[in-house]
Amino acid sequence: MSGTDPYWGGEQVVLCRDEIHGLRAVIAIDDTTLGPGLGGVRLARYPDLATGAVEARRLAAAMTVKNALAGLPYGGAKSVIFVPDPGTDRQALMHRFGEFVARTGGAYVPGVDMGTGPDDLSAIASAGATVSCAAEDPSPWTAAGTFAAIEAAVRHVTQGALAGVRVLVQGVGNVGARLAGLLAEAGAHVLVADVDDARAAATARAVNGGVVRLDSLYTADVDVFAPCANARVLDAGAAGVLSARIVAGAANDILADDPTAEVLAERGITYVPDFVVNAGGVIQIHALQEAWTEDRLRSAVNGIGDRVGEILEAARGSDRSPLHIARALAYDVLRGAREGRPGTEFVSR
Ligand code: NAI
């Protein structure tokens, strides 16, 4: 379980460097109480090692609570690879990275994340590293889980269904476009926003909805704001002017920091923690490992909605935000596992 110190939280941090292959990477293993640390490999630009290491640790800690709350037998981990110089042999770089992953002896099980894809994972696996299933696209399941979360949050706040509810989906890529379709099918009025104008317009047409300009993202007259694009889309300033009554989206790291959750709570805006909402993809990875039927997978992903309902209900009766409640539940699962208490089997019920 991660602490608050950006450097000393988590179990293990591995710095990986290889001059020949131009590799600079950080593997952060946050917690392996529940099983091997499952988390994607992010390829991104960072100004320096410290920034990349803190990002890897923060993302790894989010994977710990995500996997624990989803009832999965995995710990939390994440890795970041610094974008190499142009002309670098990518496959050789990933293979070399795979050798570092293999040295963790299975404590880190990588998957794809922003900037990496199935070919990279194959190269990592070719070095003897254990990797999560890469062939299947998790986005439809992430979208299905996000839909279940939004539906549950709307039911909690309005006691009603999605019909007629105005939802703004920010980012209509793999997850957001599918989510927009599911929301429209349920009768919601869908608005979209994307840095890619053509993509926004095409999705809006497909769901018979509208496009919101990026400079109106926070003030648009909507009931639900569903971020499905970049990280840290809401800081305290944005939270202070947000029109929506509910925030629930698939993006990792929606909030810039914890005080933003307090601003939302003070304004009566229901924030559903991203690590609860976007667990559909990791549930699918587990389903593939365990050869679940599609029905079983669907029911587990729909269980995200039940979880959201429980968390919001617990927050309603207390002075704690849904973010605090969700983290506390995840930490309780971890404590229970350490103490040998039976685990909380959300997935299989
Ligand atoms: P994607 O790359 O397919 O789509 C992202 C979309 O957001 C693109 O259309 C892009 O043009 C748009 N975008 C980027 N920056 C933007 C900005 N500042 N404002 C508005 N639009 C912007 O990504 P994907 O796979 O749909 O993932 C979306 C989010 O969900 C990411 O934060 C990702 O980390 C998170 N996530 C995705 C999972 C998956 O299964 N794909 C699983 C868990 C989390």
Image: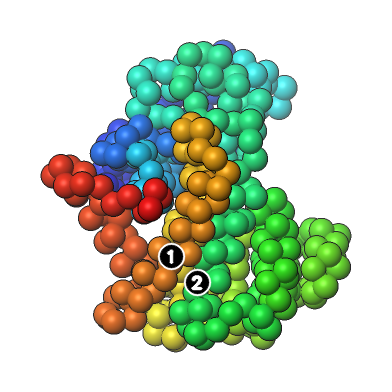
Numbered marks: total: 2
Picture quadrant where residue 222 is located:
bottom right
Residue 123 visible somewhere in the drawing: yes
> Label 1 near label 2: C-beta < 8 Å?
yes
Q: CA distance from mark 2 to mark 1?
A: 7 Å
Q: Which residue is mark 1?
A: 306
Ligand 1 lies under 8 Å from the Cβ of mark 1: no
Q: Nearer the viewer, residue 166 or 218?
A: 166
Residue 84 visible somewhere in the drawing: no
Residue 233 in the image: x percent, y percent?
Answer: 56, 65
Residue 301 in the image: x percent, y percent?
Answer: 51, 53
- Amino acid bearing label 1: Asp
Name the residue at 26% across, 39% down: 33
The disc at residue 120 is: none
Q: Is residue 334 left or right of residue 295?
A: left
Q: Is residue 211 above or below residue 79?
A: below
Q: Which residue is mark 2?
A: 152
Q: Is residue 158 above or below residue 100?
A: below
Picture quadrant where residue 167 is located:
bottom right
Name the residue at 62% across, 26% down: 120
Of callouts 2 and 1, which one flags the residue occurring earlier in the amino acid sequence?
2
Q: Is residue 51 above or below residue 303?
A: above
Q: Is residue 144 above or below residue 115?
A: below
Q: Nearer the viewer, residue 125 or 46?
A: 125
Q: What kind of element bears circle 1?
A: helix
Q: Local crowd at mark 2 within 10 Å, few (<14), some, or many (≥20)?
A: many
Residue 261 in the image: x percent, y percent?
Answer: 41, 72
Name the residue at 62% across, 56% down: 143
Q: Local crowd at mark 1 within 10 Å, few (<14), some, or many (≥20)?
A: some
Picture quadrant where residue 83 is located:
top right
- Amino acid bearing label 2: Ala
Q: Nearer the viewer, residue 236 or 148?
A: 148
